[in-house]
Amino acid sequence: MEASPIIYIFIYILTLLLAITEILPVSVASMLGALLMAWFGLNYGLFTYEEAISFIDLQLLMLLIGVMIVVEVANRSGIFRILGLYAIRLVGGSPTKLFFIISILSAASSLFLSDSAAVLIVSAIALTISRYLEYNPVPYVVAAAIMINLGGTGTLIGSVSNMIIGLNAGFSFMEFSQYLLPCELLLWFITTGVLYLYYRGELKGVGRRLEYDVWRSIEDRTALYWSSLLLLTMITLFIFSDSIRVGIEAIATGLAVIALATSRYDPGEILSRIDWETIFFVASFLFIIRGLEKTGILSRFARAIVGIAHGDPILAAVYILAISGATSIVMANVAVALTFTSAVKLMNLADKRAVWSALVLGTNLGGATLPVSSIVLMMALGALKHEGIIVDLSELTRVGVITSLIQLCFAALYLIIAFGLVY
Amino acid sequence: MTSISEWIKKKCGERFRSHEGIYEKEKELLEEAIGRSKITITIEMPRGYENQRGDFEELRNDKDFLNDVKQLVKEHLDRKKAGREGQK
C-alpha cells in the first residue's frame, strides 16, 4: 500500500512550521519530522531500511563537526579578537574609519567562524570600543551583523549552507572560491557603502586615538600560536585537497582530533561549544528531504525550473537565486540549502555551476532581510538589548530589506556576467 | 504589530541569553586590553538596617546610588594622587 505524497509534504511543512515558530527547538522539530518520515516511509514502502540508513550523510557531518572543532579551538585562543583589535588600533578612533573597519572585519571573520561566534566577538568589540569612545553603537553592531551574514558566502567553509551545497555540487575548496569569492568581495564594498550612506548621519564623535596593548586580551600565547597554525594548516590542505587526493571532510576530521588532543583547552569545553543544534538539524532535515526526493516532488520542481528557463543554465540560476533568496527570508538558510540542493541535483542541465553558485548566493544573502531571518540579526539585537540599548525594529527591517535587495540584484548581475562568459 | 515586535524582541533576548557567558567573557578580555579596568566589591548590609533589606538589595540597580559610588571612586583616586604628589 502506498501513502499519498501529501503526507510527506505535510511532514516537511509541519517540521518547518515547528522550527520557524520555535514551538520546539529547531533540532527537535527536525528530529520529530525525520521520525515521522521514517515511520511513514518504511511502513508504506517509500524506501527500504537500507535506503533510510544511506540518507545519513556522513561526509557532510564529518566536515561540519571537523571544521567547527578546529575553528572553535582557534576562536577560543583569541586569534579573531587579537586581529580585530590590531585592525581597530591601526585605523585610529575616527567614527567613519571605525565603521568601515568593523564592517570589513565582520565579513572577514565570518569567512571562517560560524555566524553566531562571529556576531558575539564583533558585537563585543563594537560595543566595548564605541562605549569607550562614547559613540552610538547601533550603526556598528547592525552593520557588523549584516556583514557577518554576507561574509560567509565566498568560501566552502564560510557557512553550514555552503558546506551542504559545496559538497553536493562536487566543488573543490578552490573551485568554490573561484566561483563565489569575487562576487563576495565586490558585495563587501557595495554593502559597506550602502550601510555607510544609511548611517553616516549617526557616525559622530571626536576621533580619539586608541592606545592599548592587544596582547593583554590573550590568556595563553602558546595556545594562540598552535591553534592558528592548525587553522592555517586546515585551509592550506583544503586548497591542495585535489592534488593530495584527500577529501576535505577527512582533512577537517583529522585536524579536529589533533586540535582536541594537543590544544591546552579542555576537550569537553570545546565540544560543548560546538553548534550541536545545527548538526542535529542538518542530519534530521536531510533525512526528511531524502524521503521527499523519493516521492518525486522535488524532481517535478526541478523540471519546472528548467522548463521555465527553457534549459538555459543562467536563466535557471537567476530563478534559483530569486526563489532561494526569498525563501531564506522566512526559512532557516540551512533548510533552504538542503531542500534546493536536492532539487538542483535532479535538474537536467549539462552544466550546473551557475545554478549551484546561485543557490549559495540566494541562501546566504536572503538571511539578513528581516530581524527574524537569521540568528545573526537576532543575536546582535540581543547583545544591544543586553547593554540596555533598544533598537527600532522597523528601522532595522528597512536596512535589512535595502541591503538584501541590492545584494540579490548585484548577485543576479554577477551570475549573468561571470557565467555568461563561461558558457 | 506591537505583539509581533514584542515577540521578536523576546526571541532575540532568549537567543542571546544562551550565549551570554561567551559574550561576557569576550568583553572582559577586551576590557583587559583596552585598559578600562573594573573591580568587583561585595558590600554587606549595615547592621541596624535589617528591616530595609529590600531597599538595600535594590541599590544595585539604583542609578543615583551608582553615580554616587562613581563619584566616590573619583574622589578617592584624586585624593590618593594628591597624597602621592605631596610626598614627592
Image (cartoon, helix red, strand yellow):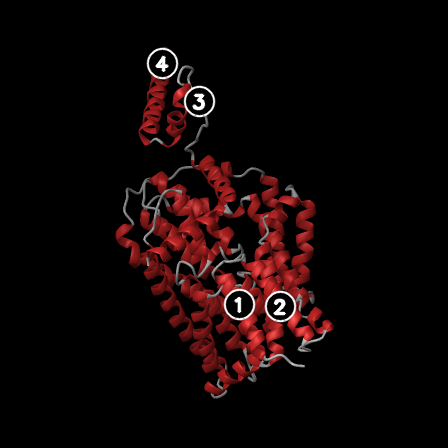
Q: Which of the 4 quarters of the picture holds residue A163?
A: bottom right
Task: Describe the element under mark 3 as helix, strand or loop.
Answer: loop
Q: CA distance from mark 3 to mark 4?
A: 26 Å
Q: Looking at the picture, do discs 2 and 3 lie on one chain?
A: no
Give the Cα separation between the discs numbered 1 and 4.
72 Å
Instruction: Check the image and report above or below for A401 versus A132.
Output: below
Is residue B35 visible from the viewing direction of this image? Answer: yes
Q: Distance from label 1 to label 2 (Cα)?
A: 10 Å
Task: Tell me the residue that label 2 is attached to.
Answer: A36
Dot 2: element = helix
Residues at discs 3 and 4 both on one chain: yes
Residue marked by disc 3: B43
The reply to whether residue A172 is in sight is: no
Residue on which disc 1 sits: A14
Contact? badges 1 and 2 (CB < 8 Å): yes
Please give the residue where the numbered disc 4 appears in the rendered image.
B83
Q: Residue at x 44, y 63 (%)?
A: A367
- Neighbor class of circle 2 (other Cα within 10 Å; few <14, some 14-19, many 20+) is some
Which residue is found at the position 70% from the left and 46% from the top?
A261
Judging from the image, mark 2 belongs to the subunit labelled: A
Q: Nearer the viewer, mark 3 or mark 1?
A: 1
Residue A14 location, x and y as percent? 53, 67
